[in-house]
Structures are given as structure tokens and as C-alpha cells.
């Protein structure tokens, strides 16, 4: 029988392996929370950080390591989505674990119910993360059965979706 893991607001995206932190000034009027995907600001504001829209495929800096202050220019830490960084992000509650997703490019988006970012394993068109493996969120062991929902996906952001494209940063 498949397990449906309970998701809550504390299940925000988080670092897993090889993650560094860098501080960026906030763009104007930011309200992002810890664990949300953040991108570089627009034209002329590339040094600033702002919340990403659903299904980002470009300019990703990483994941906010703290809540935004709402003050333009205030420094906020970001877990960098560099080429070797790995993150844990929940899967959408309607998506079941399918091991064919391992090694596949998938989308990330905001789950409005739990106010967290999740991996959409059914969206192969808005490529921003590479699924590396699934973890059981209760035991933290590698997921060994298909069919469970709301598990942890271990992912890397694709270089093409980040500002780190073509670098070893």
C-alpha cells in the first residue's frame, strides 16, 4: 500500500550536500520566506535577489536561507544553486514516486496549500532541476518503493536554469 506523507509549512526546500551560502541585497518589496526559490533581479538589478515565479527556468540564484526583510538592499543569505549543490525538495502531493524520474529534468513550483516549493515530477517542460533520488521523509532513508507521495526529492538545479551556467562556482 502506498504511503501518503503529511506535508507542512516546515517542509521547505533545504540544502542537502555541497551547498554554499552567499548574501545578496533584496530587491524592492520582497516577501519571500526561507526555503523559497530566488532569482537574480531584472535588468540593472542583477546583483539583487527576488522571489522566483512558478516554474523558473532562468536566473536562479538558489534557495533563500532566511525570510526577506521587506527592506530594499537588506542583505539576505541564499543557499547557492551551484553546479555541485544538492537540495531536498518535497514532491507535489498528487505525484507518486516513479523511479523513471531519477536522472530526469523536472520543474519546481510553489505549493499554495503548504506555502513551500515542490518538485513537479509530471512537468518535463519547465526544466529547472535534475532528480537524483528520492528519500523517505520520515526515516530519511533512500526510497525503495514506488507509489508513495509527498516524498523528498534530492535534486540539483540545472546549470542552464541558474546564473551559474557554464561555471564551476
Image: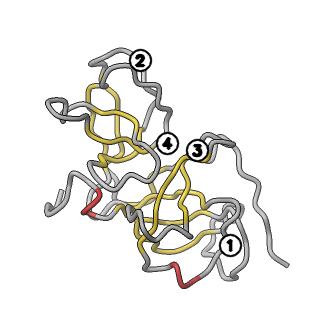
On the rendered image, what quadrant is the C terminus found in?
Answer: bottom left
Horizontal and vertical percent position of residue 165: 19, 60
Whether 110 is drawn above or below 71: the answer is below
Q: Which residue is mark 2?
A: 70
Q: Nearer the viewer, mark 4 or mark 1?
A: 1
On the rendered image, what quadrant is the N terminus found in?
Answer: bottom right
Q: Nearer the viewer, residue 26 or 110?
A: 110
On residue 51, the disc is none
User: Which element is circle 1 on?
Assistant: loop
Q: Nearer the viewer, residue 17 or 129?
A: 129
Disc 3 residue crowd, few under 14, some 14–19, many 20+, Cα 10 Å: many
Mark 1 and mark 3 lie on one chain; the one further toward the N terminus is 1
Horizontal and vertical percent position of residue 18: 34, 59
Left or right placement of residue 27 versus residue 1 in this view: left
Horizontal and vertical percent position of residue 39: 32, 42
Distance of mark 2 from mark 4, alpha carbons? Answer: 16 Å
Q: Nearer the viewer, mark 4 or mark 3?
A: 3
Residue contact between numbered discs 4 and 1, judged by CB atoms under 8 Å: no
Mark 1 and mark 2 lie on one chain; the one further toward the N terminus is 2
Q: Quadrant of residue 10?
A: top right
Distance of mark 4 from mark 3, alpha carbons? Answer: 7 Å
Q: Nearer the viewer, residue 115 or 167?
A: 115
User: Which element is circle 4 on?
Assistant: loop
Across the whole image, how many numbered discs are drawn on residues?
4
On residue 116, the disc is 3
Mark 2 and mark 4 lie on one chain; the one further toward the N terminus is 4
On residue 96, the disc is 1
Q: Which residue is mark 4?
A: 35
User: Which element is circle 3 on?
Assistant: strand
Amino acid at each position: 500500500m502506498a504511503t501518503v506523507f503529511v506535508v507542512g509549512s516546515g517542509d521547505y526546500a533545504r540544502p542537502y550536500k555541497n551547498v554554499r551560502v552567499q548574501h545578496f541585497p533584496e530587491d524592492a518589496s520582497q516577501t519571500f520566506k526561507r526555503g523559497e526559490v530566488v532569482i537574480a533581479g531584472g535588468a540593472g538589478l542583477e546583483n539583487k535577489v527576488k522571489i522566483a515565479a512558478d516554474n523558473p527556468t532562468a536566473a536562479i540564484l538558489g534557495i533563500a536561507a532566511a525570510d526577506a526583510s521587506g527592506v530594499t538592499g537588506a542583505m539576505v543569505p541564499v543557499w547557492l544553486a551551484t553546479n555541485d549543490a544538492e537540495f531536498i525538495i518535497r514532491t507535489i502531493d498528487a505525484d507518486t514516486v516513479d523511479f523513471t524520474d531519477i536522472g530526469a529534468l523536472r520543474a519546481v513550483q510553489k505549493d499554495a496549500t503548504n506555502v513551500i516549493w515542490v518538485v513537479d515530477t509530471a512537468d518535463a517542460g519547465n526544466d529547472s532541476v535534475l532528480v537524483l533520488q528520492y528519500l523517505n521523509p520520515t526515516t530519511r532513508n533512500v526510497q525503495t518503493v514506488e507509489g508513495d507521495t509527498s516524498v523528498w526529492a534530492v535534486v540539483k538545479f540545472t546549470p542552464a536554469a541558474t546564473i551559474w551556467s557554464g561555471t564551476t562556482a
